[in-house]
Amino acid sequence: MISSMSLKLYPGFESHKLGHVFEDATVTAFFGHRGADREALQKAFPDYAISSLKQTHSDIAVSATTVIRSGDPVEADAQYSSEKRIALCIRTADCVPVLIHDRESGLIAAIHAGWRGVANGIIVKTGRLLTEKGARLSSARAWVGPHIGVESFEVGDDVAAQLEAAFDGVRGFSPVMTSVVGGFEKKHIDLMVIVRAQLSSLGIDRERVMECNINTVTSNQHESFRRDREKGGRQWSFIALK
C-alpha cells in the first residue's frame, strides 16, 4: 500500500491511503489510485453501501436505487441519487471521473467520462437529468479526478474531429493541440478543457469545480490503460451523501 505521505496534495483534497478525498458535513468525494478497488473501499468506508455499474463508454445515466436493487449488473456510465450513505462508484484508468453535488436538492452524481462519453455528451446529459430531478446546478459543485493528460493523449484525425465537435459550443479555444515531430503532424487532446466547458454549460462555473490534476499515464500511483494496456487495472472513485 502506498503511504499517504507520498501523495501530492491538491487544494481542497486531503491525502488518503487509497487516494485523495474531499469531505464536509454533507458529502464525501473520493478519487482512488492503484489499490482502490471495491474491497478496499468497503474496508476504508464501512458506513457506505457500494453502488457500481457495468461501464460501456455509453451516454447512459441511471438511478443508484435501480443499480442496488437489480440482481444483474446495470449497463451505464453515470449514476445519481439523493439517498444518504450510498457510494456512487465509477472505475477509471485514463478516463475522466466527474462527481457532482447539488446542496439544495441533495442530489449527487458520479460520471465515467471516457473520450467517447465526452464526445457523446454524458456529462451534459447527466446534468440535464439532475435538473429534471430538481437539481439547481447554478449552485452545484463538481470534482474532477485523475485522468490522461494532454501530453499523453495523442489521437488520430477521427477522434480529434469528434472531440472538437463536442467542444463546438465554446468559442476562442480548442481542445486540440497540434505539433510537428519529424515532419509529421501530431494531435493531442486536452480532455479537461472540454470537461470544464461542458460543466460550465450546465451552470457549474470553474470556481465551483475542484480539480485533482494527475496524469494517470505518467503517475506510477495510478492505473493507465494507455500505458499498460490489458495488464493494467482500474481505480475506483465515488461520491456519497453523509
Image (cartoon, helix red, strand yellow):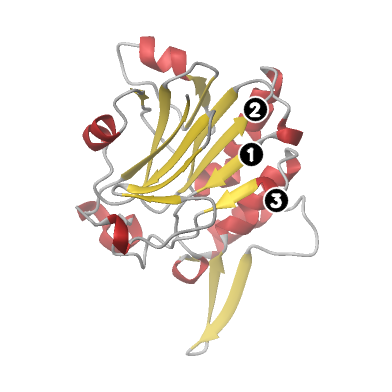
At label 3, the amino acid type is Glu
7 on left or right of 149: left
Q: Residue at x 60, y 41 (%)?
A: 142
Label 3, residues with CA under 10 Å away: few <14, some 14-19, many ≥20: few
Instruction: Identify the mark at residue 141; answer none if there is no mark.
Output: 1
Of the two numbered discs 2 and 3 on the same chain, state the one appearing first in sequence: 2
- The local secondary structure at tag 2 comes to loop
Give the image quarter of residue 123.
Answer: top right
Q: Is residue 116 above or below residue 62?
A: below
First in sequence: mark 3 vs mark 1? 1
Classify residue 143 as left or right of residue 205.
left
Q: Quadrant of residue 219?
A: bottom left
Say which amino acid is labelled 1: Arg
Q: Are marks 2 and 1 in contact (CB under 8 Å)?
A: yes
| Residue 121 seen in render | no
Q: Residue furthest bottom?
A: 182
Q: Residues within 10 Å of mark 1 (few under 14, many from 20)?
A: many
Residue 2 position, x and y percent, is: 23, 56
Residue carrying label 2: 103
Residue that carries the numbered disc 3 in the rendered image: 207
Q: Position of residue 225 (x, y in %)?
A: 32, 55
The percent coordinates of residue 126 (x first, y second) are 60, 30
The three-letter amino acid code for the residue at tag 2 is Arg
Classed neighbour count for the residue bearing mark 2: other residues with Cα under 10 Å, few (<14), some (14–19), many (≥20): some
The foreground one among 83 and 66 is 83
Specify the quadrant of the image occupied by residue 133.
top right
